[in-house]
Image: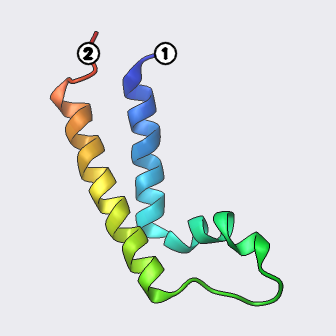
Amino acid sequence: MNMAVFIILFIILAILNIVYPSFGWYLRYGWMVKGESEPSEAYLIMSRVGGIVALVLLIFVLFSGAFTY
């Protein structure tokens, strides 16, 4: 399978992390908590920042041709 397909998949995940950062929190921690619980603002901000950094790096790798065989 072409490496570009995996990079595009991770780009979609990075965009999802930027737009809905609480989704990742619910998948990782939310199921462990009984009752109402929300992620902190710091977690949401750092999740968005991480998504932006990942998106920039993945777009650079996709268009740089680093994985052309």
Q: Residues within 10 Å of mark 2 (few under 14, many from 20)?
A: few
Callout 1: few (<14), some (14-19), or many (20+) C-alpha neighbours within 10 Å?
few
Q: Is residue 30 above or below residue 34?
A: above
> Sequence-wise, which precedes: disc 1 or disc 2?
1
Left or right? Give the position of 35 relative to 49: right
Q: Nearer the viewer, residue 25 or 1?
A: 25
Identity of the residue drawn at 45% across and 48% down? 12
Q: Is residue 51 above or below residue 11?
A: below
In the image, 17: left or right of 53? right
Query: Which of the numbered marks, if any, corresponds to residue 67?
Result: none
Residue 65 horizontal/vertical position (percent):
20, 23
Secondary element under disc 1, as helix, strand or loop, is loop
Give the residue number, with chain letter if any, for mark 1: 1
Q: State the image quarter where residue 24 is shown.
A: bottom right
Q: Amino acid at mark 1?
A: Met
Q: Secondary structure at mark 2?
A: loop
Amino acid on which disc 2 is placed: Thr
Residue that carries the numbered disc 2 in the rendered image: 68
Q: Position of residue 14 (x, y in %)?
A: 41, 54
* Extreme residue in the top direction: 69
| Depth check, front residue: 40 or 15 | 40
Q: Position of residue 44 (x, y in %)?
A: 45, 78
Q: Quadrant of the C terminus?
A: top left
Real-space Cα distance between discs 1 and 2? 12 Å
Q: How is the image coloured?
A: rainbow
Q: Quadrant of residue 7?
A: top left
Q: Position of residue 22 (x, y in %)?
A: 56, 74
> In percent of the image, x 67 and y 71: which residue is there?
29
Looking at the image, which residue is at 24% across and 35% down?
A: 61
